[in-house]
Structure formats: structure tokens, C-alpha cells
Image (spheres, grey):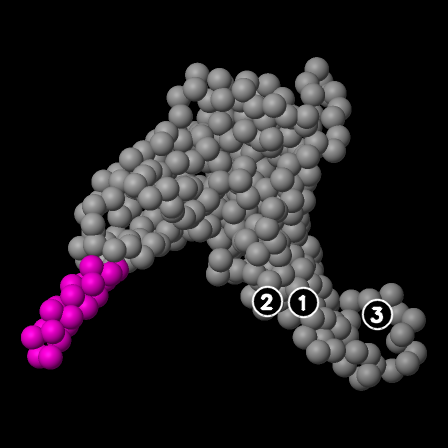
Amino acid sequence: MKNLLVPIFLFCLAATAHAQSFRLQGKITNNKMEPLAFATVQLKEQQAGTATKEDGSFQMNLEVGQYNLVISMIGYKTQIVNVVLNKDLVQHIILEEEQDNLMEDFVIRIKVKDRAEEIMRNVIHNKDQVTSAAGPYSAQLYIKAIQQDSVLRKRDRAKTDSTLFQNQNDDLQGMAMTEVLLHLDYASDLKIKEQRLGVKNYGRANDLFYLSATEGNFNFYNNLIKVPSISTTPFLSPVSYSGLLAYRFKTIKTERKDGHRIFTISVKPRQLSNATVEGEITIADSSWVILHTHFSFPSYHLVEYDFFEVDQQYGFVNDKAWMLSRQQFNYYSKSGKRKLSGQTLVVYSDYELNKNFGRNYFGTEV
């Protein structure tokens, strides 16, 4: 019996060792180190794999062995990476964008009834040229933020004599307002400098949103919209190759203006569980630039708000670059009987493009 048990034990031990699995994880990015969501990571040998999350990360549990990872993504060259797995492994991968002629051939082969996705693809393919035209720049920002607090309004009214209910200032009870005039110097998302030229406050301004350009970057030309002040989770921009997979696009309006066609495109997420936005984007043909955006953010990814939306307008500055001319945020939150509703308007003017700020101008990066 003992002689029989020993081989059985050794067989079980060998089977356990063979079945031992390790974790393979990493992040897929482009050459600007921007994460690529919904990229495919496939095992060539097994025809199995996974897709990256919104932050470009992936994870698989695999047995000991050697594997060929096939990484593919619309708009990028497919890459094959060989890995040997005998322990937990972190493998980061950078994908290169497709060449112009390859992308054009790809677009021609697509059969679509609606040109919305083709239009968005042109914007994505052209966005580096659009965003680099301005270079480092300066601008003047006028910010007006207003917020209404339902609890404060009721409390103030209770303390006010009834004869004052007819006063024209009655609507200001429970309201906070701040006006800010500031000078902005911008070289990159990590090199920003502000100088406040004037501030005017009314009421309690502590909870007002966006009194500084550093509170959030709603640049939809970026692959991810990172606004920690409203969400710890970055939102996936529709103007990205990952966005082509995450969103459904539909042309809802086409018009002619100054000899160009202007397309208004509806943007809806394919899966509501993703960190996505919903709304409309307006595009000019030929130049393939954004003229207007109107997007709302899903409440389940918002920390403080039950509703939040941004409306943006772009203008052509100094015959060189398309820049934000106006930005408006609308939001509200509700907790019990308390409701906060707010609106912030940001107007941009006096742009100076392609500036040379000099070395150490920004000091500590923010």
C-alpha cells in the first residue's frame, strides 16, 4: 500500500505545480503615455484574452509558460510581445499610431450609413495638429460662479420680517456668488500659473465650483478627462480611439456656414457602467476641429453631485489655433431636504499664443 501511495502523492504534487498560476498585468499606452482603453490583449497560442480598462490596465491569471501577447487597438499598429511567466509579472506596452495612408485605407473600407463615426475618426486623427497649434499660451479669464442653497434660503426667510418678502433682494437669500478675473499662463497640464487680478464675493463661496483653472481640465482632445474635484475616476473622452469603441455616434444635424459643413453629432455610451459622458459635439469639416461640446457626466461616478454638465464653445484665435472662448458648468446635488444648485460661467479673452515663458518660469509644477 505504501508503495502505491508514494506515486499517487508525487503525481498530485506534480499536477498541483503544473496548475500553479501567476498574475500577468500591465498598462497599454500610446507614445504620449496616455492610457488606451478597450485595447485587446490576446494570447496567440490560446485564442483567449482580455480588454484594457478605462485607465489602460489589464490583468490575467496564467499558468507557468511562455506566451505571445497580441495587442491591438483601432488606429494603432498591432504589436506582439513575448513573455515568460514563472512569477507575477508587470508588462507595460506602448502602441504606435497607424501611418496616415493606412488609416485612410481603413476608413474607405468601412461601410457606414451614417458618417458620424468617420467624422469623429478624422477629428481624432487630426487632434495632435490642432492642439499643438497654440503652443504655450496666456489668456485672461472672467469667472462668474453662482450657487443656491435651499436650506440657507429657508433659514434666512424664517429670520426675515414678512414685509421684506416683497424686497427685490429676496431671491438672493441663500445664494452665493463669486466673480474672478485672472491671468492664466499655460505650457502643459503640469505647468500652469495663475494671477488673480480681482475677486468679488457675495455670500458663502466655499462650495462654489471652478474659481480657478486648476480645478479641472475639461479638454476633450485628451484621451481622459481628469477632474478630481468632481470624480476620482477619469472619464473617457469621445475624441479618442478608445472612445470609438466606448461610444455610439449619430449625426443629428448638418448645416453650411462660411462655406463649410458643420456636423452636430450625438454621443452616447455603449455601456452605462463605464466612466463615460453623454451629449453632443459639433465639428467643422476640412479642419476637423471641435466648435462646441455639451456633455453630462454619470451621477454614479460623481462624488458630490447628482448632476453635472459642461457646455463649451471654441473660437479661432489670431488665425492660428482653435481655443476655448466660453465654458459653462451646471450642477446640483441633493441630500435629504437640502439641494445645492450652481452654475459657473468662464469667458476666455486676450489670448497670446506660442509664448516663450523661459526656464523655471513656472517653478514648482502644479
Toward the viewer: 99 or 315?
99
What's the amino acid at mark 1?
A: Ser
Q: Is residue 202 magenta?
A: no
Which residue is under mark 2?
Answer: 304
Which residue is under mark 1?
Answer: 333
What's the amino acid at mark 2?
A: Glu
Q: Is residue 19 magenta?
A: yes
Indicate the position of residue 24 as horizontal and vertical percent values. 28, 53
Marks 3 and 1, the one that precedes in the sequence: 3
Q: Secondary structure at mark 1?
A: strand
Indicate the position of residue 275 as horizontal and vertical percent values. 54, 53
What's the amino acid at mark 3?
A: Asp
Residues under labels 2 and 1: Cα distance?
Answer: 7 Å
Region in magenta: 1-21
Toward the viewer: 32 or 75?
75
Toward the viewer: 151 or 348?
151
358 above or below 212? above
Q: Is residue 199 left or right of residue 255?
A: left
In terms of image quadrants, where is residue 246?
A: top right
Indicate the position of residue 341 as horizontal and vertical percent values. 71, 64
Residue that protrudes farthest toward the left in the picture? 3
Does the CB distance between marks 2 and 1 fall below 8 Å?
yes
The kind of secondary structure the magenta stretch mainly shows is: helix
Quadrant placement of the N terminus: bottom left
Q: Secondary structure at mark 2?
A: loop
Which residue is under mark 3?
Answer: 170
